[in-house]
Amino acid sequence: MTDWKNFDLMNPTPEHKMLRDMVKSFVVAEVEPQAHEYDRKEKFNLVLFKKLSELGLLGITVPEQYGGSGLDAVASIIAHEELSASDPGFCLAYLAHTLLAVNNLAVNGSDEQKKKYLPGLSDGSLVGSMAMSEPDYGTDVLGMTTTAVRKGDKYIINGRKMWITNGALDDNKTACDFVWLYAKTGEKDGRTLLSTFIIEKNDPGFYVGQKIMDKLGMRASNTAELVFENCEIPANRLVGAEGDSVNHMMRNLEIERVGLAAMALGIARRSIEIMNKYANERMSFKKPLNSYGQIQKYIAESYAEYKASQAYVYDTARRLSLNEEGNRLDSDGVKLVATTMAKNVADRAIQVLGGYGYVGEYVVERLWRDSKLLEIGGGTLEAHQKNITRDLSRAGF
Ligand SMILES: Cc1cc2nc3c(=O)[nH]c(=O)nc-3n(C[C@H](O)[C@H](O)[C@H](O)COP(=O)(O)OP(=O)(O)OC[C@H]3O[C@@H](n4cnc5c(N)ncnc54)[C@H](O)[C@@H]3O)c2cc1C
């Protein structure tokens, strides 16, 4: 019989528990001390990012034969939750690298492509990004206009990609080392045929365009426009078969969405810790704040909503196979519910702290700003609503 009483949904195995403890210690020692400064400077901490390789976190889902840690979706979710409890902006750069670029390659690349890039992406010598969105096409992703045309043993790529996390590195001008790029290679029966290409930073005709600065939140991650002007790459950088990428793009969005939901859990947990401690200590009318019913409502509802999201996120992650049949319904579901939960919880935390909540020293204002991106990136709330309704209707739920 399963020992349900001692079953730990968030750490289903002793290895998951060890991983969580290790990331937590790293966060206390290395991530938390720099989080405020890098948010204020709007700067990506590349040096700290590379240190994640020492913990085996940069290639967390990469099979060991390619230099990774060979861990599962739950392990990845643990890393995202713990990093995000301190510095969601830094964690977004981690997500773009490990889930959008690296995991995509580990699942969909050829053996030759995996051997060439995965060891460097896992040991921190290469930083990855994924370029799907464009200036005029976000939610309507299949409308993309970036094209790739085969000429002999080369592809010529033209177009612009927008909002690319890690698209530019430390000085926000140098392009990142590895880009997982989606481009249009044709149309069939009125449908866009999408293909995936690997772009290297020194490819001719590839450069960083507009630097995207002055973001509301996630300021510790770099966001850039990437430009492809007659960018010429060898034909062996095509991933899989030409025109066959829609399925794997949609499949990888699942782990991305569960990762973003895990980031929301980290934000919510930290916000609850801060408001709980503050309401316990802060006196008003000679009584602690947490003796007042309105404050209790903020804290209690936040905790209960966080725990409900936590169960849904970990249950979905536990059932998410990285290679096989997907679970689009619940990956949309967890992101829909957890991200707004996190924003509401961070908002209540600011309210409980009053004026102190409104300034950087008390952290919750940064968590609140960062939480808003989770309702937009990796699919907007409206996109999740549309997908869930369509999937439920097809399933005859
Ligand atoms: C900080 C940041 C980092 C990002 N990182 C990356 C990255 O690394 N790689 C990448 O490829 N992209 C990235 N993105 C892009 C992100 O995925 C898109 O912003 C997102 O998909 C929404 O696209 P959009 O901004 O073009 O908005 P739009 O698609 O123009 O949507 C605008 C609004 O209209 C709504 N809407 C659109 N269509 C419909 C409809 N049919 N029905 C109802 N409502 C609709 C949307 O939900 C939204 O509210 C990032 C964005 C940000 C802000």
Image (cartoon, rainbow, N blue to C red):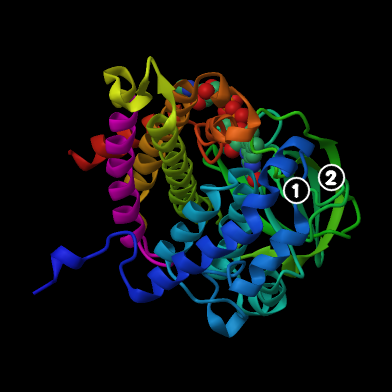
- Magenta span: helix, strand or loop, mainly? helix
Residue beneath disc 1 = 44
**How many neighbours does mark 2 have within 10 angstroms: few (below 14), some (14-19), or many (20 or more)?**
many
Residue 286 or residue 388, whichever sits in front: 286
In the visual, does 394 lie left or right of 180? Answer: left
Is residue 276 magenta-colored? no
Magenta region: 298-325
Badge 2 marks a residue whose secondary structure is loop
Image coordinates for residue 317, horizontal then vertical, percent? 36, 57
Identity of the residue furthest to the left in this view: 1
User: Can you identify the residue that label 2 sits on?
Assistant: 172
The location of residue 238, given as percent across then percent down, is: 69, 63
Residue at 76% over, 38% down: 42
Residue at the spot x=89%, y=60% of the render? Answer: 202
From what the image shows, is residue 350 above or below residue 255? Answer: above
The foreground one among 64 and 19 is 19
Across the whole image, how many numbered discs are drawn on residues? Answer: 2
Residue drawn at (69%, 74%) of the image: 123
Q: Amino acid at mark 2?
A: Asn
Amino acid type of the residue tagged 1 in the rendering = Phe
Q: CA distance from mark 2 to mark 1?
A: 9 Å
Residues tagged 2 and 1 counted as in contact (Cβ below 8 A): yes
Quarter of the rendering containing residue 333 = top left
* Left or right of 19 on screen, residue 100: right
Residue extending farthest top: 285
Q: Is residue 273 visible?
A: yes
Estimate how packed mark 1 is, as few (under 14), some (14 to 19) or many (20 or more) residues with alpha carbons within 10 Å: many
Q: Is residue 195 above or below residue 279?
A: below
- Locate the N terminus and report the quarter of the image it occupies: bottom left
